[in-house]
Image: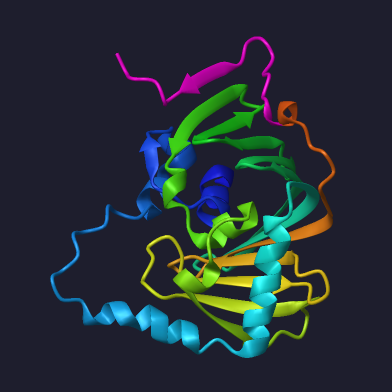
Amino acid sequence: MYLEKLLVTLLAAPVIAPVPSTVAQQVVAQAPAQPAAPAPAAPKAEAPKAAEKKVAPEVKELVERMQAFYEKTQDFSSDFKQDYKYKALRRTQTSTGTVIYKKPGLMRWEYQKPSARTFVLAGEKVYAYDPEAQTLSVGRIDTSQLSASVTFLFGQGKLADEFSISKGACKDCKGTLLVLDPLKQDPRFRQVRLEVDPKTAQVLKSTVVDPDGSENAIAFLNLKTNVGVGADAFKINPPDGTRIDDFTKPRK
């Protein structure tokens, strides 16, 4: 459950090489299909530009500061709390752990509760380590297809190019709530909500609404930027006896 939800939330992209169905079946199911060839006449193509112009000045200013914050961020470390609300089951699963990031595109998620798991994004490879099951799975994603809802964290991509952005109402928010509705229908998610600190312009919480209405919320706690995270922090060295399933290699 962890890897598919994590990828859909933060690394939603088509899977290039297959990974175990027990780990990433939902990622494959929700990954976008290859785009069809554009029609000769596409009057609806102007809709995104029109929607972009409707962004309120104060919202536009906050979005620009937020993107500038991550553009100048070379690395960060943070604790996190993840609450996944299953709409159909009417229950919430809470997970906690730590996350580190380093440009360009290195991320490591260490889940601590309810059980230990490690997920690493390194280039176009994704590593999922389960110490209890003693397994390490390796898959690949097409990072060129990442949504701006992900790449802006890397200092890339423009949210206004892909989303209609508005200010939302939120009683319990510690920052300003930005509601991002895709300008084009996206099979990976229905909506993205970002809780942003109005002073620092950093994201305090990210919530992705799945197509079925379930919500995956990740709150970033004690976030520290430009702390000098080394590249070695993203290596996984499993102990002897770990089964390694590398699905990026051609099958014999």
Please name whichever residue, 208 or 161, is drawn nearer the observer in this view of the structure: 161
Residue 194 percent location from the top left of the image: 65, 71
Instruction: Identify the residue at image location x=69%, y=64%.
Output: 68
Indicate whether residue 91 is drawn in magenta.
no
Is 73 drawn above or below residue 120 in the view shown?
Answer: below
Residue 156 shown left or right of residue 109 in the figure: left
Instruction: Identify the residue at image location x=36%, y=71%.
Output: 185
Q: Which color mode does the image show?
A: rainbow
Instruction: Identify the residue at image location x=29%, y=54%.
Output: 33
Residue 79 shown left or right of residue 240 in the figure: right
The answer to which quarter of the image holds residue 93 is: bottom right
Residue 205 percent location from the top left of the image: 71, 66
The answer to which quarter of the image holds residue 3 is: top right
Residue at the farthest top position: 240
Residue 231 percent location from the top left of the image: 71, 30
Residue 131 shown left or right of residue 17 in the figure: right
Q: Quadrant of the C terminus?
A: top left
Q: Main secondary structure of the magenta part?
A: loop
Q: How many marks?
A: 0
The answer to which quarter of the image holds residue 217 is: bottom right
- The magenta region covers 234-252
Residue at the farthest left position: 40
Is 203 drawn above or below residue 125 in the view shown?
Answer: below
Residue 30 percent location from the top left of the image: 39, 55
Is 225 drawn above or below residue 47 in the view shown?
Answer: above
Indicate whether residue 248 is drawn in magenta.
yes
